[in-house]
Image (tube, rainbow, N blue to C red):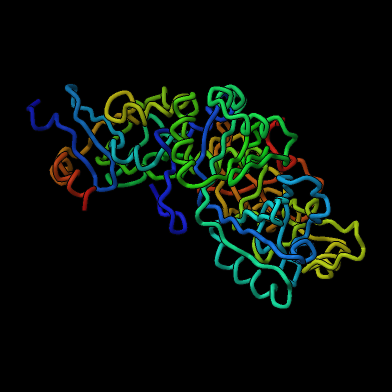
């Protein structure tokens, strides 16, 4: 168990690699109640969030639809990444746990003069059910809401009373995330275990998301990184020219520049894990060209993999030096599986 | 070989050494260490014939969590390595004291054993 920003959480329940393989092959469950849920209501909720977020919630048509977005600061850098959902009462943001305090004060600062109220929901828990056998596990529980949610297209969902079920996750596998009351979550956790799901810790959560090429806030991006530099450009929506979201002009200035860093994937042949902070070079003894932002072992590829932020390039390979040894990495797209 | 010498002895840095009947010594890492490291995915072993000084780096283990140096409890010449670990490093997690041994050396100074911790002292050092 570790203290994860005030939450006592397991790195693993036995073996991180076994848990990783369970999610890739059968069905695993994650207690992700540490994530921060913020509910927005009031007449101006939609207009406010169209200003707060880089992605455009105009895309959310039905209740329970979700959208991945960045929240940028005035300089156009990433304050956080999140999913915003359309709800009957307005909108729901699920943001990172590590950024909770910062996000809430930023949002509160920007809420002034808007007819919008923000309410944190510490009373709600979140369970994530992920893996190719998720439908089998959920069908054993005999709860129609979960099956309805699982059969939606990705980033859609369904909601009844307090319970929100969406086709989302952080593993690259088919699955649902279920937001529900703490009391119901305790019961559901036990039911899912009895139905054949395995509990998965934070360790496997990290290697699963890395293989799927999903960013981790604080690693791939922070308040000094533009969405352009962390493969989040697709989450910035410029279609509505009249929409003036926070950070827009700085973002556009940066986009117009000829050169900025980009995020790539690295696959290593040597049996050495290249960890975050490691420098990257384009020639064996070349100059600094980038930094590894996440690096671990891929249980699926059985090789070390990494995400790295580096200068624009069309190279096939780059180099790193670990413990005095020069090692070569194949540069790939920042996604390691055919998910 | 007397009984006392056959017992596993430890470094505070979590390596163990165990004298064998032929006078050689096997080296590995403790159960506490493998548990702390989590799943071990790669191992770099020393070369056969390599001379190692006590408490110097002899091997490296990489778990999903971190890379760690393995220091040699004794000085001597490496006479065997556990090649099984190259393809199946998870053996270190499942059997740290038996099948998960790292290398075997011919000790050059057997008196170095006296400065190592016995199992009880080692366990106490982990708890403190």
Q: Nearer the viewer, residue A324 or A221?
A: A221
Q: Nearer the viewer, residue A55 or A254?
A: A55
Q: Nearer the viewer, residue A34 or A266?
A: A34
Q: Taking A181 as reference, is A256 left or right?
A: right
Q: Say above or below: A314 vs A297.
A: below
Residue depicted at 70% across the width and 51% down the height:
A87
Q: Taking A316 as reference, is B4 left or right?
A: left
Q: Say above or below: A22 vs A128.
A: above
Residue A286 image offset from top left, x and y in percent:
70, 54
The residue at the far right in this view is A241
Q: Nearer the viewer, residue B28 or A198?
A: A198
Residue B89 image offset from top left, x and y in percent:
43, 29
Residue depicted at 69% across the width and 55% down the height:
A89
Residue depicted at 41% across the width and 22% down the height:
B84
Q: Quadrant of the C terminus of chain A?
A: top right
Q: Quadrant of residue A71?
A: bottom right
Q: Taking A274 as reference, is B23 left or right?
A: left
Q: Is residue B46 visible?
A: no
Residue A283 image offset from top left, x and y in percent:
71, 49
Q: Quadrant of residue B82?
A: top left
Q: Is residue B55 visible?
A: yes
């Amino acid at each position: 168990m570790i203290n994860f920003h005030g939450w006592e959480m397991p790195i693993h329940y036995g073996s991180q690699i076994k848990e990783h393989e369970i999610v890739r092959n059968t069905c695993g469950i994650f207690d992700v109640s540490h994530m921060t849920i913020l509910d927005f209501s009031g007449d101006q909720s939609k207009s406010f969030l169209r200003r707060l977020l880089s992605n455009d919630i105009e895309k959310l048509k039905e209740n329970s639809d979700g959208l991945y977005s960045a929240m940028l600061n005035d300089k156009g850098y990433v304050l956080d990444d999140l999913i915003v959902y359309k709800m009957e009462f307005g909108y729901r943001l699920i943001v990172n746990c590590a950024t909770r305090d910062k996000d809430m004060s930023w949002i509160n600062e920007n809420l002034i003069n808007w007819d919008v109220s923000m309410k944190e929901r510490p009373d709600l828990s979140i369970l994530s059910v992920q893996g190719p056998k998720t439908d089998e596990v959920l069908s054993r529980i005999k709860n129609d809401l979960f099956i309805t949610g699982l059969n939606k297209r990705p980033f859609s969902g369904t909601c009844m009373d307090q319970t929100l079920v969406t086709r989302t996750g952080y593993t690259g596998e088919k699955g649902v995330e279920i937001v529900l009351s703490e009391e119901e979550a305790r019961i559901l956790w036990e039911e899912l275990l009895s139905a054949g799901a395995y509990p998965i810790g934070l360790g496997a959560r990290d290697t699963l998301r890395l293989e799927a090429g999903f960013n981790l806030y604080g690693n791939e991006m922070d308040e000094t990184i533009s969405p352009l530099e962390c493969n989040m450009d697709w989450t910035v929506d410029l279609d509505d020219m009249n929409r003036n979201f926070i950070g827009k002009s700085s973002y556009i200035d940066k986009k117009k520049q000829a050169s900025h860093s980009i995020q790539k994937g690295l696959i290593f042949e040597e049996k050495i894990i290249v960890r975050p902070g490691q420098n990257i070079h384009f020639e064996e003894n070349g100059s600094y060209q980038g930094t590894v932002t996440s690096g671990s072992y891929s249980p699926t590829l059985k090789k070390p993999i990494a995400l790295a932020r580096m200068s624009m390039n069309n190279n096939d390979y780059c180099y790193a030096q670990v413990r005095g040894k020069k090692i070569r990495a194949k540069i790939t797209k920042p996604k390691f599986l055919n998910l | 070989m007397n009984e006392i010498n056959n017992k596993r002895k430890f470094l505070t840095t979590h390596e163990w050494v165990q004298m064998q009947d032929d006078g050689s010594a096997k080296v590995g890492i403790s159960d506490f260490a493998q548990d702390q490291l989590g799943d071990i995915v790669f191992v770099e072993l020393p070369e056969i014939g390599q001379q190692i000084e006590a408490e110097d780096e002899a091997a490296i283990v990489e778990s999903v969590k971190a890379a760690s140096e393995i220091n040699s409890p004794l000085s001597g010449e490496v006479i065997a390595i556990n090649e099984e670990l190259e393809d199946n490093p998870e053996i270190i997690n499942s059997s740290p004291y038996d099948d998960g041994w790292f290398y075997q050396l011919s000790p050059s100074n057997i008196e170095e054993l006296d400065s190592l911790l016995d199992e009880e002292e080692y366990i106490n050092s982990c708890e403190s």
